[in-house]
Image: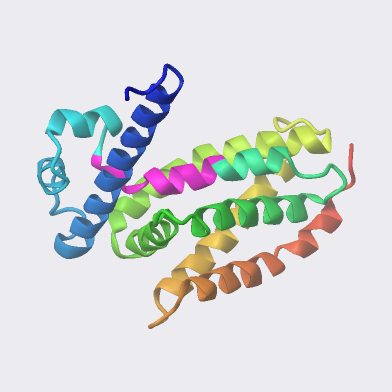
Amino acid sequence: MSAGPEEAPNLRERKKLRTRYAIIATAVDLFFERGYDQTTVAEIAEAAEVAPRTFFRYFATKDEVALALITEGDDHVVRALQGRPPEEPPITALRNATRVAVERLTSADDGTGELWVRIVRLLEVSPPLLAAHLQRVLSIDGRLAHQLAHREGVDPDTDMRPLFTVGIVSTALRAAHHRWSRTPGATVDDLLRLRDAALDLCEPLDRHWTRGE
């Protein structure tokens, strides 16, 4: 029995997602096994059993495949921040948005949560990849700062609090990831606890916010 007109696109989309995640998982395995710098796109494609042209349909560069789930997580944070209640103070809103994003990734039953955690660890042992990630952080911080400015009713071009607040939260999470990656036997729950502890340190910054000023 053939698929109906509405079923076929869904099947194709699921197949594309499976291929995408298979490429990501294979790449991460190779990065840990051989080193990030030593692994080529051709080797990733061969190990994932796809043609190089198929790889490039999904990812433009090696950096992009390595950071794909981090990028997904960042996009989740932006959307989650947009949905936070307006009465939440800025730090609280950012904290809850990041928690929602991480919970969405780590609670998935398709293995993406475990893969995301491995990529967090990979960042800490691959300086070139970390440099590429930090370059991306500037862009995502700008998006979050504009969203935060909008919800707080301030101009991000003249008020430095939105970008400062987002930057502090971003740095706190980086510190948590750094410490977690250097703790032998640390688990995903340990990572989440460290993230919460780091964000606790940020909450006093809310006193510098008066809505609309």
Which residue appears farthest toward the bottom when viewing the image?
Answer: 184
Q: Residue at x 45, y 43 (%)?
A: 71
Query: Residue 188 location in percent, x, y?
Result: 48, 71
Left or right, 5 with reference to 190: left
Q: Is residue 97 left or right of residue 182?
A: right
Residue most extreme to the front: 1
x 36%, y 38%: residue: 17
Q: Please, which residue is most extreme toward the top here? A: 5
Query: 51 or 143, which lies in front?
Result: 51
Say above or below: 129 vs 213. Answer: below
Q: Considering the image in quadrants, where does the N terminus appear?
A: top left
* Residue 116 lies in quadrant: bottom left
What is the total number of numbered labels drawn onto the structure image?
A: 0
Residue 73 shown in magenta: yes
Q: x%, y% of residue 133?
A: 40, 48
Return the x and y of residue 117 as percentages of the image width and height: 42, 62
Please give left or right for residue 154 compared with residue 33 in the image: right
- Asked whether residue 168 appears in the rendered view, the answer is no
Establish if 124 lies above or below 78: below
Does 27 sit above or below residue 140? below
Q: Residue at x 37, y 46 (%)?
A: 67
Judging from the image, the colouring scheme is: rainbow
In the image, the segment drawn in magenta is 62-75
Q: Position of residue 66 (x, y in %)?
A: 31, 48
Give the prevailing secondary structure in the magenta stretch: helix
- Tell me the residue at 51%/53% (across/down): 105
Is 102 included in the stretch rendered in magenta?
no
